[in-house]
Image: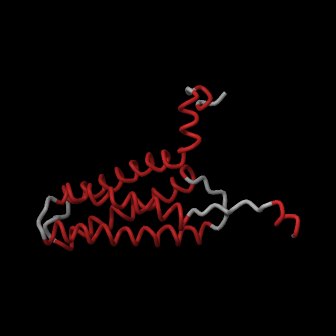
Amino acid sequence: MTLQDKLPKFVQKLLQKYGEIIRYLIIGVLTTLVSLIVYYGLVFTILNPENPVELQIANITSWVISVTFAYITNRNYVFRVKDHHKFAELIKFFGSRLLTLFVDMVIMFIFVSMLHFNDKIIKIIAQVIVIILNYLLSKFVVFIKPKPKSTSESNQS
């Protein structure tokens, strides 16, 4: 008997129906924590967030570490990919994350460097936007599950 079998039936149904989204949210929170810990660690110790270049160095460093963590966990635990095309998938994953890094950088530049909002608060807001974009890109661009062949297609081959 698995842990899931011990859960109440309504929880089992929720997990069956929304398991991927729930797993993504959990991994997304962990990835965000990795990103924020690295970012805050850098700006509270060695980098000055008031300097636009140092702000982006902290941002990019936190991005590289958190995206590496995200790829491994999304592949294995969220989307449960068994496909062996890891290199192409890795390229798509990092490419889609580059897009959301750009969104993150633009948000940080506009609201922190230009408008002088608090970088700690803006970073959290930016992360919420990035999480949503990352899920959509991962689901529909990176970790695409092959469609099962219909019986008529498999009989024709």
> Where's residue 123, x and y in %?
25, 59
Judged left or right of residue 42, residue 129 is right
Q: Residue furthest front?
A: 152
Q: Is residue 49 above or below residue 5?
A: below
Q: Quadrant of residue 110?
A: bottom left
Q: Is residue 17 above or below residue 47?
A: above
Q: Does the rendering let one see residue 45? A: no
Residue closer to the observer: 19 or 37: 19
Q: Does the rendering let one see residue 56? A: yes
Q: Quadrant of residue 120?
A: bottom left
> Where's residue 1, x and y in %?
67, 27
Residue closer to the observer: 112 or 33: 112
Residue closer to the observer: 106 or 10: 10
Taking the spot 57% from the left edge, 62% from the top edge, the residue there is 143
Quadrant into which the C terminus falls: bottom right
Q: Residue furthest left?
A: 116
Judged left or right of residue 31, residue 50 is left
